[in-house]
Amino acid sequence: MSVTVRPAAVAGLFYSAGRTALAAEVSACLDGVPPARAAGVCAPKAIVAPHAGYVYSGPVAAHAYARLAPLAGRVTRVVLLGPTHRVALRGLAAPSAEAFETPLGRVPLDRGALARLGDLPQVVTSDAAHAHEHSLEVQLPFLQQVLGSQGWSLVPLAVGDASTDEVAEVLERLWGGDETLVVVSSDLSHYLPYREAAATDRATVDRIVALDAAGLDHEQACGATPINGLLRVARRRGLAPRLLDLRNSGDTAGDRSRVVGYAAIAFEPAGDASASRRDTDTAANAGDDDARLGAALLGQARRAIAEALGQPVGPAAPAHGALAERGATFVTLRTAGELRGCIGTLEARRPLADDVRMHALAAAFRDPRFAPLRADEFDALEIEVSVLGEPEPLPALSEADACAALRPGIDGVVLEWRGHRATFLPQVWDDLPEPRAFLAALKRKAGLPPDHWASDLRLSRYAVRKYVEATREEVKT
């Protein structure tokens, strides 16, 4: 193995050795995915795909890769984890190579990302672990086909004996934003009779889809170790797993006496997935309930402000059981699209109904940046209510780590340092889409210099459910 390029090791064994034949083989697998299954509701942040010979697992893997088509040109880094089959290994192994090669071309490695793992004791450098490992290599032609031959780099890690926490720590360090895709390579059960394998694999994927990170074992999935790490991070970051395909070699190209199981699973941003599902009949009940909660919160906010201004309050705000539950809200007010007030809390201390009314009044009359709201502004007032999830720590050794870990458009962020504290809702990403600029502005809000960083500076993130009143034009349509 060259220190510069890791050559294809299983071309001609697991997949076609010729460039033209391989491209046709991958295309045939992708073309076999029904359009409805390929489309999906949103692009995945992570996938699990099998790694057997293409004749066996290629049609199943294609269901995961077909979902990545919208990411071409957007994803610039792929973090690829797969189990070691030939070399005993403690921890996770990075290669020393500058590129990996397949018959479809060379994929450059993100050496900068690999260098950021250098302080983690569970990460080692081992070219031997990569030299003949197929679990990573067989994913590359699919990635090259769906993401293009240029414009993205690879972070390949061969996973040996490692704990769930150790894998999760590596994934958190590399998670990034929309530019980063995570791929975990794994087959399921090995060499069971067909019916036993089908039942075993169904139980395994049920645990994965339930984000059960208690610990899959290697009889259930040869890539159990990286899957467990991914499940831990997916739960923290609010990803929703979606099973795309589940079959085994007895369904694709082998006999049914001793089969190997394969699954294709996508991990989608839960907020995006739920928003999309609200537009479908299959999630109508959940979407209707969420819409009712939004209407109830917005009604509470508007009535509180109307009463304070002596304006007609209109019909009673809709009822919803969740209004009696403790929650944390921010209320944002705008007129003609311009901010008019924004006040809220990060801690769930009181019932949602009380919390939203209190912050509606504070945003209208006690935001120090604005004069108190006038009665003649009430009719044109646009109200937005954000319900905050529980903040979770965002570990970062440096500002570069923090920028890589933040999810633009998704994360609300809290910054704390020696009595300085500030937060930005996820809506602020609309004006500051670049993580470094976002953090600089957040530091200024906290009364700190924009270039400030310290080892005891703490960041945390939270998710938000946002509800916005319909405009007059929206009501007409």
Image: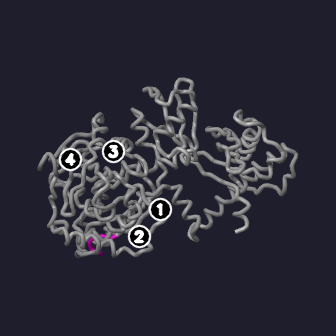
**Side (left or right) of 178 relative to 317:** left
Q: Which of the two discs, 2 and 3, labels the residue nearer the N terminus? A: 2
Whole-number angstrom distance, CA of label 4 to CA of label 2: 32 Å
Whole-number angstrom distance, CA of label 4 to CA of label 1: 32 Å
Residue 167 marker = 3
Camera-near label (4 vs 3) is 4
Which residue occupies the extreme top position in the image? 418
Helix, strand or loop status at disc 1: loop
Task: Residue under label 2, please give it.
Answer: 38
Q: Position of residue 15 (x, y in %)?
A: 19, 67
Circles 1 and 3, Cβ within 8 Å, touching? The answer is no
Residue 98 marker = 4
Q: Which segment is the magenta one?
A: 247-251
Q: State which quadrant residue 32 falls in.
A: bottom left
Q: State which quadrant residue 319 falls in.
A: bottom right
Task: Residue under label 1, please give it.
Answer: 42
Helix, strand or loop status at disc 2: helix
Whole-number angstrom distance, CA of label 4 to CA of label 3: 23 Å
Q: Position of residue 230 (x, y in %)?
A: 38, 50
Query: Where 367 sits versus 313, above or below?
Result: above
Q: Is residue 249 magenta?
A: yes
Whole-number angstrom distance, CA of label 1 to CA of label 3: 26 Å
Q: Nearer the viewer, residue 344 or 88?
A: 344
Q: Which residue: 53% across, 32% down?
A: 443
